[in-house]
Amino acid sequence: MIYPLNQPLTELLLLSIIAKNDSYGYIISQSLKKVSNLKDSALYPILKRLSDQNYVEIYDQQFQGRNRKYYRITPIGEKRRAELQTEWQAYCKEIDAILKLEQTEEKRQAEEKSQIEEKRQNAEIQLEQSEQTEEMKQNAAEPTVIEGGNQND
């Protein structure tokens, strides 16, 4: 599932991709497509804005007779990436806490259901034992009839 990206998360992803290696647009775009639906037409204005904010610098490099624009993270960009990553980790921690709370609630409900089932089964066993005990008492109270007739012969 791909979730929509907000501006800070998009910045974090772009800066992280570029921090690993100097990259050009196509490589950055392919990396982002794994986690977002960001269009190439939206990517380049964001990269331009990151350059304007001095988070990345742009340089040209020849590749097969053509110039490619490469993006390199700056020290200011690395600082911004670290700040965004810290915020992202805190956000993920909060999300995890909510998910664990829901899982804990689901677990509690399952345990409660299991306890109710166990009590029902115990009640059935006790009822069955009680009926057997009552039947044994009734059988013990009835006179025993011995067949075979007269013993004085």
Image (cartoon, grey):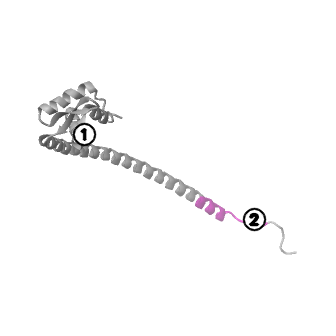
* Residue 151 rendering spot, x and y as whole percentages: 83, 73
Front position in the image: 112 or 104: 104
Which residue: 17% across, 44% down? 82
Amino acid of disc 2: Val
Could you say which quadrant of the image residue 9 lies in? top left
Q: Nearer the viewer, mark 1 or mark 2?
A: 1
Name the side, left or right, on which 96 lies relative to 125.
Answer: left
Magenta residues (range):
132-146
Q: Residue furthest bottom?
A: 152
Q: Residues within 10 Å of mark 1 (few under 14, many from 20)?
A: many
Q: Is 50 included in the stretch rendered in magenta?
A: no
Main structural element of the magenta stretch: helix, strand or loop?
helix
Q: Is residue 58 above or below residue 19?
A: above
As helix, strand or loop, the secondary structure at mark 2 comes to loop
Residue type pointed to by label 1: Ile
Q: Are marks 1 and 2 in contact (CB under 8 Å)?
A: no
Q: Where is residue 59, by image quadrant?
A: top left
* Residue 10, placed above or below residue 134: above
What percent of the width, then of the height, locates residue 91?
Answer: 22, 42
In front here: 46 or 22?
Answer: 22
Total numbered labels: 2
**What is the x, y in percent for residue 122?**
50, 56
**In this view, 41 is above or below 145:** above
Residue in the picture at 37% in, 49% down:
108
> Can you name the residue that lies furthest to the front here?
65
- Relative to 150, is 68 above or below? above
Res. 145 mark: 2
Q: Nearer the viewer, residue 139 or 18?
A: 18
Q: Which residue is mark 1?
A: 17
